[in-house]
Image (cartoon, grey):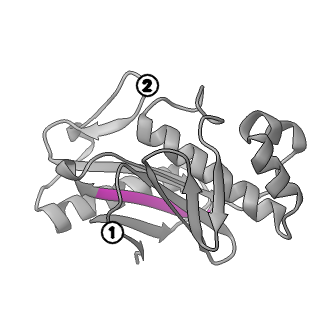
Amino acid sequence: MIRVYIRKCGNSHSEQHDTAYRLLFEKTEELFGCSAGFEDISHTDKGKPYYTDIPVEFNLSHCRGYAVCAVCGRDEGAVGVDCETIRQFREASMKRIFSSDEMVMIRNSDSPDMLCTRLWTLKECYVKYTGTGLAGHMQERTFSFEGDRVLSDGELVFLSITIDDSAVVSLCCDRERSAEFILSP
């Protein structure tokens, strides 16, 4: 099972970063019985963090007011997670990020800022899952929705939730399996 822990924190970048890593180290010990610290983490050539010798897969994100940590056993496959506070998007940025179908969805939405943020987090959790970074692939996936269900081409699974009508957290994983989003004290 993938667990996505969400913790409220301050607005400074350093506090958000530190809170995300504290969550990771706490949950690695609590769920997997492994004591971990910064010295146990390596990075791919594109910057994706991973544990060198601990059999835990993880991904981190943070935004104004929140830190997020997705964890599961390494044998369960890769994960990518992203969180963003809801913000206004400009048309010029949207054209570089979203497909034409997504742009139509946004223009027809009652809540375009919420939808833009949700779509952005889905795209970002995908590139974090692949480890390719933001330099490419943002338009590679097109998303649509059936109620609360996220639809995308391909075999990957995407989940997305809204927190307090102020932020969106999205998860990408490689197969259908259970995931739990947990507000952590």
Q: Amino acid at mark 2?
A: Lys
At x 34%, y 27%, the residue is 44
Residue indicated by mark 2: 46
Instruction: Point out the stretch of residues depicted in magenta.
Output: 65-71
- Residue 88 in view in this figure: no
Q: Earlier in the sequence, mark 1 or mark 2?
A: 2
At x 43%, y 33%, the residue is 131
The answer to whether residue 30 is above or below residue 127 is below
Q: Position of residue 72 (x, y in %)?
A: 26, 57
Q: Amino acid at mark 1?
A: Ser
At x 43%, y 42%, the residue is 129
Left or right of 170, for residue 90: right
Q: Position of residue 183 (x, y in %)?
A: 44, 76
- Report the mark closest to the observer, 1 or 2: 1
At x 10%, y 62%, the residue is 33
Q: Is residue 69 magenta?
A: yes
Picture quarter with the N terminus? bottom left
The answer to whether residue 30 is above or below residue 21 is below
Residue indicated by mark 1: 178
